[in-house]
Image (cartoon, rainbow, N blue to C red):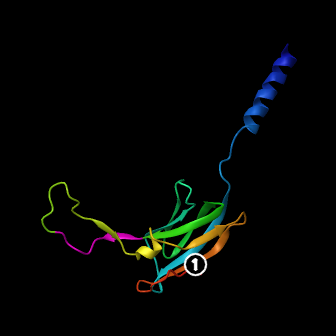
Amino acid sequence: MTASRVAVALVVATGLIGGCQKGPQTAPIAGAVTLDGVALDDAVIEFDSGDGSVPTSLNIVRGAFSGGVTLGTKTVRIFAMRPARKSRSGLGATDVQNPLENIIPHRYGYDSTVTVAIGADGNTNLNYQLESKSESPGSK
């Protein structure tokens, strides 16, 4: 009976190990972001697959970002939230007193058309040179 219990335990353990799902495959990415030639700091870059899943968000620090992103074509969105420059008078008690605004032009944020294809080898040379006054998104 002891040998059969060991055999059952091995079968169960093998099933548990083999049944573990790792989740979606990711690849390493890294790069740099500038706004009007200046390294962007304290910002976020998102990689959105457009399939309803949560986008991968990476912090941009001193112009650089890195991390793992799931494979496939992604829409790239960049956000740098700062206190709004316009003061609002006449706000009620429930209104936001210190609203934030994205200092990055909308064409690089929610309206972005910038895309990148992430393959199994990843991409560690993604560089985005944003311009505050340009009409079209810039990516290299």
- State the quadrant of the C terminus: bottom right
In this rendering, the answer to whether 111 lies above or below 54 is below
Amino acid carrying label 1: it is Asn
Disc 1 packing (10 Å; few <14; some 14–19; many ≥20)? some
Q: Residue at x 81, y 28 (%)?
A: 10
Extreme residue toward the right, this view: 3
In this rendering, the answer to whether 101 lies above or below 21 is below
Extreme residue toward the left, this view: 90
Judging depth in this view, the residue of 49 and 11 nearest the camera is 49
Please say whether residue 101 is one of the residues in the magenta stretch: no
Please say whether residue 83 is one of the residues in the magenta stretch: yes
Q: Residue at x 61, y 61 (%)?
A: 69
User: To which residue does mark 1 refer?
Assistant: 127
Q: Which residues are magenta?
A: 80-88
Extreme residue toward the top, this view: 1
Q: Residue at x 48, y 86 (%)?
A: 37
In this rendering, the answer to whether 80 lies above or below 8 is below
Image spot of residue 12 (x, y percent) = 76, 27
- State the quadrant of the N terminus: top right
Image spot of residue 74 (x, y percent) = 59, 65
Q: Secondary structure at mark 1?
A: strand
User: How many numbered markers are drawn?
Assistant: 1
72 relative to 46 in the view: left or right: right
